[in-house]
Amino acid sequence: MIKRRDLLTLIGTIAGSSAMYHAMTSLGFASESAYKGPLRLAGDPKGASVLILGAGLAGMTAALELRKAGYKVQILEFNSRAGGRNWTIRGGDSFVELGGHRQKCEFEEGLYINPGPWRIPYHHRALLDYCRRLNVALEPFIQLNHNAYLHTTRAFHGRPQRVRSIKADFQGQVSELLAKVTQQGKLDEAVTKEDQEILLQALRAWGALDRDYKYNANLGSAEFRGYSRDPGGGLTADPLPSDPIALPEILRSRLWLALQSFARYNFQTTMFQPVGGMDMIGKAFAREVGDLIRYNAKVTQIQQNGSGVTVSYVDAVNPSAVQQATADWCVCTIPLSILSQLPIDVGAPMKNAIEAVPYAASVKIGLQFKRRFWEEDEAIYGGISFTDLPIRQIAYPNYGFNRSGRGILLGAYLFEGANAYEFTAMTPAERVASAVEFGSLIHPQYKDEFETGVAVAWHRVPFTLGCSGEWSDAGRAQHYRNLCQIDGRIVLAGEHASDLPAWQEGAILSSLDAIGRLHERVVKT
Amino acid sequence: MMMRLMASLIAVLTLLSATAAIGQDSAAGRRTFSDGYRFVEMTGEELFANVCQGCHMPDAMGASGAGTYPSLAANKNLESGAYPIFLVVNGRRGMPAFGDMMTDGQVAAVVNYLRTHFGNDFQDAVTAKDVQDARR
Ligand SMILES: Cc1cc2nc3c(=O)[nH]c(=O)nc-3n(C[C@H](O)[C@H](O)[C@H](O)COP(=O)(O)OP(=O)(O)OC[C@H]3O[C@@H](n4cnc5c(N)ncnc54)[C@H](O)[C@@H]3O)c2cc1C
């Protein structure tokens, strides 16, 4: 019998790499991405013009590709910068939220917080490809840090537990239970005798069980859950094991819930972040298409007829005079929270779809501390601690490791649920103060080391009025295709027109799909 | 606009120092935090201050950026209690639905609060039963 790997080598040499790719896919090696490599728009658009609304990643992807294909392109953008939700806040930046509260970020130079997108899964092939083509340097985003904490106010007297020990103890004791029922013959119907032997070996190896298939405090389990004294040198070299947490305690604490945050496809290693802040991506796009963008242009109406599109807009700073821009076609990437309020000439199916998508609540809070105590005192280098406190997460910076001096924590990351609304309803200063208050229950150093913070509540962000489109299954079934269909001369794109809600990949893939269809129509007419 | 900015800036500064000085009476202590998906706030006033004002603002005047949150102050649309009940339960356009996050009593409380504050004076209170009926 020929082995799979050998077969692949064979196909590779005989038929070239595209056959190889197809073979790999059907054999289950390469996973399917909706991204098929750089877009090729064949055919002459004969000088056709396209007006793009919004200079987020969806809008700038469309601009870059359409100009390359020969279109005349113009972008109207509400903000005075490109990138949209792709955004980083650094020391010296200011930001005014809806309601008028102005925050000036007082972070030390070089320190930053990503208030929106912050991590990129390895399977977001389109986004990664643009990063490569546009020279955006990436570094690892650490999702799973075994030495970060899982925390609940309802167990362990509120003391945070290391991810490492919860994971090892849960895995170890579940293995012990399974080994026990296996040995009692209770799996005889489900598993052959031969396989039961292998299963027992596997459980011992995977669960760190001892010779008797028990999970105990010993140097074997310590290799998984950690030592009470680490191996050393010289006369203090001998390590000491640590005591496992009993299974009932783990079960009742519900801390096992957090383990899926490391296991799911969207959060599996390797994840990435751009070096220097997420907005390096938006800035890289703007280097390519910045000359096409008209900033501070707030779109107020979108009209079309048989021969073209007319978009009305006002100066966002000085909105007295209405101006108009015209083009043959329009790619609109304005978030639906805003687009649903604008007069737009589209048919009922698209209009109903535009009105069918509520926008999720989300809050992120960045906190600057005098020293990186999480590294110095607690050996936590990057990653995320999870808690059932209203702040939900504390995320440690994945850059500048082991440096002395200041550092920034993500002191809260709320998404949906009651707390996200409650934090949105506060003033920025209250949000920051609350994040410090709650966070100090996990890191008591907060009280002495905290300096300054910024808080972004996405429903108060003037250019999105919300975090992201929150499709229900029923809403998607009824409206999604109508949202994405070309209506006359208008096509929509953006995160909301994708099945990757609240991911940048969704914004880019929706844009590529929309302009591919638009181009087909243009070259046909 | 400038005046309003200055006022809020001063509010921010006062708040920061108040928090620092009082300690126990911290911001986290004064606010209500629910412990699950649903809201624990019960009175209309609490619900407004912890939920609605996130978008419609503490004075219920709404706000405007690239899009707008409508003002609920002196708002004729609140005349029929059924309308705000429908919106809170089902949401509308970008506004999320709160039907799953609030009980009938909570929805009624916040609607009644809105309809009798911020320049609204509609005295015919809605009931939890009205909300229950609207959910069907
Ligand atoms: C809290 C949070 C966390 C996230 N985490 C991640 C993550 O970890 N990884 C990830 O990949 N993604 C993440 N996302 C999602 C990601 O940010 C979005 O999917 C993506 O940036 C959306 O791009 P877009 O082009 O569709 O929309 P946008 O970036 O919103 O672009 C739309 C543009 O339209 C402009 N506009 C709006 N109204 C008007 C108007 N009236 N006239 C003119 N212009 C207008 C806006 O200013 C904006 O520039 C997160 C988002 C949030 C909010």
Image (cartoon, rainbow, N blue to C red):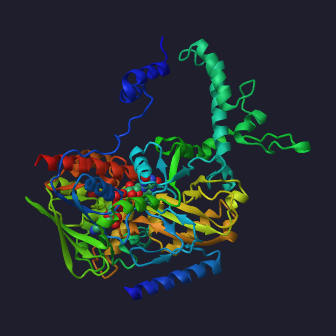
Residue A281 coordinates in the image, percent (x, y): 43, 58
- With A329 as the anchor, is B88 left or right in this view? right
Residue A75 coordinates in the image, percent (x, y): 27, 64
Q: Is residue B118 above or below residue A251?
A: below
The quarter of the displayed image where residue A221 is located: top right
Residue at the extreme right of the image, as rendered: A235
Residue B54 coordinates in the image, percent (x, y): 41, 70
Residue A269 coordinates in the image, percent (x, y): 54, 43
Of residues A377 and A10, the one drawn nearer to the viewer in this rendering: A10
Ligand 1 resides in the quarter of the picture at bottom left
Q: In this view, does A330 lie above or below B122?
A: above
The residue drawn where x is 30% and y is 79% is B73
* Residue A162 appears in the rendering: yes
Of residues A158 and A279, the one drawn nearer to the viewer in this rendering: A279
- With A49 as the anchor, is A431 left or right in this view? right
The residue drawn where x is 58% and y is 71% is A109
Residue at the extreme left of the image, as rendered: A306
Q: In this view, does A206 lie above or below B100?
A: above
- With A175 as the anchor, is B59 left or right in this view? left
- With A262 as the anchor, is A465 left or right in this view? left
The residue drawn where x is 53% and y is 40% is A263
Tally of numbered discs: 0
Of residues A132 and A149, the one drawn nearer to the viewer in this rendering: A132
Of residues A116 and A271, the one drawn nearer to the viewer in this rendering: A271
Q: In this view, does B59 lie above or below A218?
A: below
* Residue A390 appears in the rendering: no
The quarter of the displayed image where residue A80 is located: bottom left
